[in-house]
Amino acid sequence: MQNPLHEFHGGCFWISFKKPINILYENRVVDFALELDFSYKILYCTFIIKKELLVPKIGMEKVRKEAVIGATMRCLCKGGFTGLSVKAIAAEAGLSTGIIYHYFKNKEDLLLNVIREAFAQSHQNVMQVVEPLTSQRDKLFKHIESIHSVVLDNPDFYTVLLNFLGQTSNNPEVKKIMTKFLSNLTSYVRRYLEEGVARKEFAPDKTKDLDVMIIALGMGLGIMCTLAPETFDHKQLGESFKSFAEKYVE
């Protein structure tokens, strides 16, 4: 069997048969607390398992980051920012805190990546169904339909969004991301309207500020249906949402 010494690349350790084994790796001492009667094979296997928890695997960055971001979203949905810790996120992800700090500078860096990912997922889902269409009218109403469907298609989105909204007043980075997100949302609707006017699909005198109103109404309905789904009829509100927009683009 291969010597376990050779398995720990870039590190060094000392073994004493009179006390537990300590590993010195990247200036951190990890106590394995192995019993004296452990066999060489068990020592080898335990060592490799522990090594997997400490050292990020090559080529696993994307998978690990997605796992951590997903775990953070779940923690936010369960308990919000109160009591949110890297330790809790690591437990949810099934990883060590060291792995998280390898990929993210600190908790704030992780949270900023979480909100970016939440927005990116929502945007990607909408664009997949909207962009293949050719008529600006079809794009506009499919966009409205997709915005309203976020509550069902991505139920955690608004929960995560509401948690971050409370951070905008004292966190400039979160505010910057939120502002950019809202700006991007309105810009897509504005593009449909402007191109629709140019193609004479929409009347120019009826589309002023319609992009902002559509996004504001869509997100407002999404928040209401997330907070009180038993109170509001999501399907009926979706029909009313489209009827509202139709009055401006007939």
Image (tube, rainbow, N blue to C red):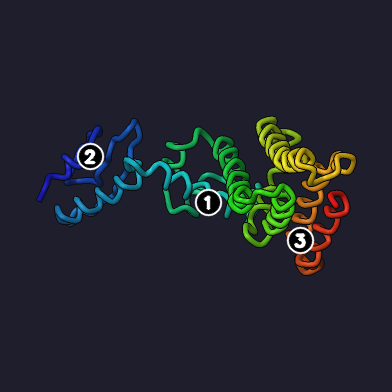
Neighbours of disc 2 within 10 Å: few (<14), some (14-19), many (20+): some
Q: Nearer the viewer, residue 126 or 55?
A: 126
Q: Secondary structure at mark 2?
A: loop
Neighbours of disc 1 within 10 Å: few (<14), some (14-19), many (20+): some
Residue kind at label 3, given as amino acid type: Cys
Residue 44 left/right relative to 86: left
Answer with mark 1 or mark 2, whichever residue precedes in sequence. 2
Residue 198, given in percent of the width and then of the height, sits at: 77, 38
Residue 167, given in percent of the width and then of the height, sits at: 71, 39
User: Which residue is the site of mark 2?
Assistant: 8
User: Which residue is the site of mark 1?
Assistant: 70
Residue 78 in sight here: no
| Contact? badges 1 and 2 (CB < 8 Å) | no
User: Which residue is the site of mark 3?
Assistant: 225
Residue kind at label 2, given as amino acid type: Phe
Residue 3 in sight here: yes
Residue 242, given in percent of the width and then of the height, sits at: 80, 57
Marks 2/3: CA distance?
52 Å
Residue kind at label 1, given as amino acid type: Gly
Q: Secondary structure at mark 3?
A: helix
Q: Residue at x 28, y 51 (%)?
A: 49
Q: Residue at x 83, y 52 (%)?
A: 245
